[in-house]
Image (cartoon, grey):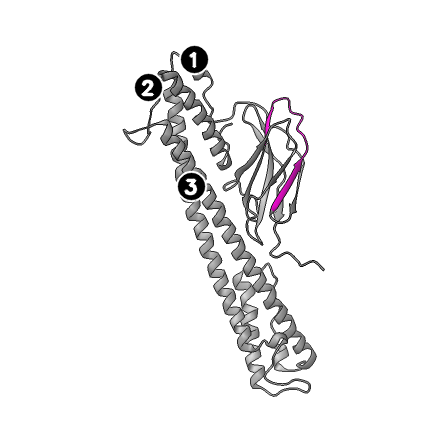
Amino acid sequence: MAITGNASYISTINEFIAHWEQCNLALAPQSLLVRLPDSNTTLNYTQFVSLRDTLQSQQNVVQGCRISQQLARGDINLQKAALLAKFSEFTSLLDGYYRNTRYYIARPYAPSLGDGQEVFTHPMVDMMTLWEEMNAGIAPAGVTLPIILEDNVTDGAFASMVAALQFAYATERRKAQYVLLARSDRNLIQDRAYELMKTYRDAVPGKLIEFPALVETMPRLSPLPGHTPQQVNASAIFEAPNLSKVVYEASDDAMLDSYQLRGNAGEEYSEEDAVVVATRGPGEAREFVTTFGLTQPGAGVALKVFVILTTGNEAGSAVLLVQRPASVPLAA
């Protein structure tokens, strides 16, 4: 392996850990110490393992924050759909009973579900104002004032729905900020790990001069020169209650080393936040089954299957999206 992005850090660190262990065995009873690049202190094998564990934990924190943000977005969409339904009901009332009136002329036009907060909210506020004015006016034939929509939704209840949407947007914004903070903490750990691995590669040739095999087999930080493999076709489905099942075609590259499933929580694949979910060898069954990212109803994941060559070069498949239903329908 080599560092090709955020997802490759843990795998690469594990290779350095395995190599460090072999160096310690060769140097026994002494052990290999690596000087930290930003100070005069040193770090040993155990501390490097601890740094790996800290990074792994922080990667999980990032995914957890992404899940929380995704669920908050889902809540926004549910509320917007409910508001659009009431908006449609209200405008139908205008069409049926208020034509040729000032209320009809002032009618707002429906936004789209995908519109942002401001564009979506403005017509809803206009509808609230129009509803209040109509309640204060004279009822046309066939209409009883105050206007109450289905499910006993009054103008006040609708105003509360609009207000709740604003709170939902604020919650999603907070969740997004938590993602940024968690990602920043992860990046600081990754930077520290990268500098340590770089220094490790500088230290080994001098400390292990009597063990040329260990010098020659040091893990790499960058892929070797070579070609990029062809991506493989892959597909994914949701399997109840909380599984993604991914199947993929075989690569015919002569330098094939392994296949990796990478992914992140959310509806879009992020090279910045994706992590390695699982790895398969060339001769293993060409499928991945995982609960990654689907621990809560309504959660979804974006996945890719990567072909990894012995040189460290790689290529990912098209993005695979898997969504866990917000609820499971009852059997008939």
Q: Considering depth in this image, is 289 or 11 the residue closer to the camera?
A: 289
Q: Secondary structure at mark 1?
A: helix
**Residue 197 sits above or below residue 324 on the image:** above
Q: CA distance from mark 3 to mark 1?
A: 35 Å
- Sequence-wise first label, 3 or 2: 2
Q: Are marks 3 and 1 in contact (CB under 8 Å)?
A: no
- Sequence-wise first label, 3 or 1: 3
Q: CA distance from mark 2 to mark 1?
A: 18 Å
Q: Considering depth in this image, is 311 or 41 the residue closer to the camera?
A: 41
The picture places residue 75, in percent across and down from the top left corner, at: 55, 60
Question: Which residue is denoted by mark 3 in the rendering?
Answer: 186
- Sequence-wise first label, 2 or 1: 2
The amino acid type of the residue labelled 1 equals Pro
Q: Considering depth in this image, is 297 or 98 the residue closer to the camera?
A: 297
Q: Nearer the viewer, mark 3 or mark 2?
A: 2
The picture places residue 221, in percent across and down from the top left corner, at: 46, 27
Specify the farthest residue to the left.
40
The picture places residue 9, in percent across and down from the top left corner, at: 47, 33
Question: Which residue is denoted by mark 2 in the rendering?
Answer: 30
Q: Nearer the viewer, mark 2 or mark 1?
A: 2
Q: Tell me what residue is drawn at x 45 percent, y 30 percent.
A: 13
In the drawing, what numbered circle is on residue 21? none
The amino acid type of the residue labelled 3 equals Arg
Q: Tell me what residue is drawn at x 67 percent, y 30 percent.
A: 250
The amino acid type of the residue labelled 2 equals Gln
